[in-house]
Amino acid sequence: MADISFGSGDVWLVGAGPGDPDLLTRKAERLLAMASIVFHDALVSQAILDLIPSYVMQVPVGKRAGRHSMAQGAINSLLVKSAQNGHRVVRLKGGDPAVFGRMTEEVDALHAKGIRVQVCPGITAASAAAASGVFSLTRRGSTRALTFITAQGCGNGQNDIEWSAIAGEQTLAIYMGRAAAPHIAEQLIVNGLKPSTPILIAVNVSSPHERLIHGRLDSLALLMAAVGDRDPALLLVGDVTHAHAETADLSSEWFDLPIDMASAPKVRVCA
Ligand code: SAH
């Protein structure tokens, strides 16, 4: 086992993975035991927080879409001050810190004060969702590209995504897509994706409350509306998500027909 360098005044940004403590890396677990203080996101599961030894201080700095959250600047200051006070600081983030994790802001703030920062990667939600659904995010010959997208703030008229550039033969992994779901479906269809393009809404991936909702792009808004708004949900769009029902586990739900309000009872659900 390689030595881990974690001195007083150092900061480690650590990926906690999607929730299942067995999907935490061994390095992350070692870092949690070496830390003197851990600042964690709301996305980090209780099962993972339970692995933090009781001698380590735990500070929630959670952010959840649309809810009270600590401003990024305040989090940066806390990290800087704790390191300057000689703590061994772990900043624990859901998934991989390098995927939509505000990592750059924190690294920049720490570097600006001359604080040493190291990063331990984690399993990102898209990888965990594909694993749960037993399909590959890429497919030899047909799906050669995978795009990670954050839908946060899109659909409000400013700074929208260049939908025409991504509506093609690739897998889209759309993070924070709940609020923008109707806009996402509309824009992808307007820009050339078939209404029947398979989608997967992966909810609470890798937790005991996991739900995998398979459907079609034209039903996205309705399917997303059925997801509890406290539950993290990742949207995958593309042919690769069209796994066979026989290989799916009990957390899978299938909506193979287009859903519209008038014909909603026709929906077939088989778990
Ligand atoms: N750094 C994280 C992503 C943070 S952005 C990662 O690499 O996974 C937060 C978004 O990630 C959520 O809104 C949701 O879209 C997705 N997400 C994170 N964990 C998830 C989980 N366990 N199940 C489903 N989606 C998840």
Image (cartoon, helix red, strand yellow):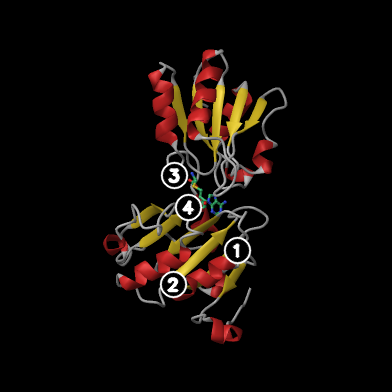
Q: Residue furthest front?
A: 157
Separation of disc 2 and disc 3 at Cα?
23 Å
Q: What element carries label 4?
A: helix
Name the residue tied to disc 3.
100
**Amino acid type, label 3:** Phe
Sequence-first disc among 2 and 1: 2
Name the residue tied to disc 1.
227
Separation of disc 1 and disc 3 at Cα?
21 Å
Separation of disc 4 and disc 1 at Cα?
20 Å
How packed is label 3: few (under 14 Cα within 10 Å), some, or many (20 or more)?
some
Separation of disc 3 and disc 4 at Cα?
14 Å
Q: Disc 3, ligand 1: is the CB inside 8 Å? A: yes
Q: Disc 4, ligand 1: is the CB inside 8 Å? A: no
How packed is label 4: few (under 14 Cα within 10 Å), some, or many (20 or more)?
some
Q: Which mark is residue 217?
A: 2
Name the residue tied to disc 4.
127
Q: What element carries label 2?
A: helix
Sequence-first disc among 1 and 3: 3
Q: Which residue is drawn at 60% across and 53% down?
A: 206
- Nearest the viewer among 134 and 81 is 81
How packed is label 2: few (under 14 Cα within 10 Å), some, or many (20 or more)?
many
Picture coordinates of residue 35, whole percent (x, y): 60, 23
Q: What element carries label 1?
A: loop
Picture coordinates of residue 127, whole percent (x, y): 47, 52
Sequence-first disc among 2 and 3: 3
Q: Which of marks 4 and 2 is in front?
A: 2
**Amino acid type, label 4:** Ser
**Amino acid type, label 1:** Val
Picture coordinates of residue 84, whole percent (x, y): 52, 14
Sequence-first disc among 4 and 1: 4
